[in-house]
Amino acid sequence: MKAYVFGANGAAITDVAKPAPKGTQVLVRVHACGLNRADLGMTKGHAHGSAGGAGTVLGMEWAGEVAELGQEARGVKIGDKVMGSGGAAFAEYTLADHGRLFRSPSNMNFEEAATLPVALATMHNAVVTNGALRPGQTVLIQGASSGVGLMAMQIAKLKGAKTVIGSSTDAIRRGRLKEFGADLAIDSSDPGWVDSVLKATDGEGVDLIVDQVSGKVANQNLAATKIKGRIVNVGRLGGTHADFNFDLHAARRIHYIGVTFRTRTIEEIREIFDEVRKDIWGAVEARKLQLPIDRVFKFDDIGKAFEHMEANQHLGKIVVTL
């Protein structure tokens, strides 16, 4: 089968053996894939958790049809339309644990479905489970113009947030954040953004920050969070190391929580997918939670899709179809 594989000379479409499902695995005939920032890093040879290196089939998000079932796979049958996440997604067939997929709603095509699994699982876990957002509270999404950021704002609104603030350093994308739930859009590269957040929250700061930037905004985040507020660290696009004001952190008694899928067990991931189904799946089916598709590329042009992502001018998801 065709697959997009990282090799000694970089990433390229290559023929590889079709995988076979075992145990709780499901074999999926892939129709569409969503690109994510971690995929871009892996095309440069970076590891993502235990995945990476020569011979790695890239990709972590997809939509397609169930082709085969492992002996212990439950909850789906051959022919079902599904979407999910896991390794080796950029291929004609991929394997997924039966607990790491969603049934695709009947009102959603494969391209649309491929945009959602990572964003839904990541941001429901960050905003609701770890962020403990309650109706009437205020939230700031750092890096809000990414696909997962746009989803975070929508989930926050769905769960009753009083004020949703989104950040983007790009003026055009920042201007569109209100379409996805932002009451206020800020530029996190502007030194005055903390003052804007404090003004919007009567001087108190936000109850919750979901941070995909980290790096240089770490101390500003502390200053923008109210006393006894929460910061959930989801991503580190602005850097993995920076100065951290421990005294401000302690003085504001902030709960600082780090999350990643890279070190989660399959049992933990199944629980996250279950929580999405229980809590917000009705909103997904009603199309209240959805992401814009920036561009769609054919699989043979997947290299161009990655060039488009690296240019960093897109809003929403980049999708590849097979």
Image: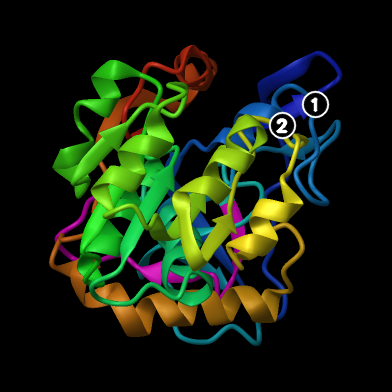
Which quadrant of the rendered structure holds the C terminus? top left
**Mark 1, other Cα within 10 Å: few <14 / some 14–19 / many ≥20:** some
Q: Which residue is at 66% across, 38% downward? A: 58
Q: Where's residue 147, x and y in %?
A: 38, 41
Compared across the picture, whether 121 is left or right of 8 comes to left
Of residue 114 and residue 146, the one placed in the foreground of this image is 146
The answer to which of 282 and 228 lies nearer the viewer is 228
Whether 199 is among the magenta residues is no
Residue 258 appears in the rendering: no
Q: Which amino acid type is shown beneath numbered disc 2? A: Met
Placement of 130 over or under 205, stated as above or below: below
Task: Give the secondary structure at mark 2.
Answer: helix
Residue 42, disc: 2
Which residues lie in the magenta part? 94-110
Q: Which residue is drawn at 21% across and 64% down?
A: 162
Task: Give coordinates of residue 183: x percent, y percent.
Answer: 18, 46
x and y percentages locating residue 188 in the rendered image: 44, 29
- The secondary structure type at the circle numbered 1 is loop
| Quadrant showing the N terminus | top right
Residue 99 forms part of the magenta stretch: yes
Q: Do the residues labelled 2 and 1 touch (CB within 8 Å)?
A: yes
User: Residue at horizontal 75%, vertical 52%?
Assistant: 246
The amino acid at mark 1 is Gly
Q: How crowded is mark 2: few (under 14 residues within 10 Å), some or many (20 or more)?
A: many
Disc number placed over residue 45 in the picture, else none: 1
Q: Compared with residue 270, is residue 51 higher up or lower down, i.e. above or below?
A: above
Residue 193: image location, x then y, percent: 39, 32
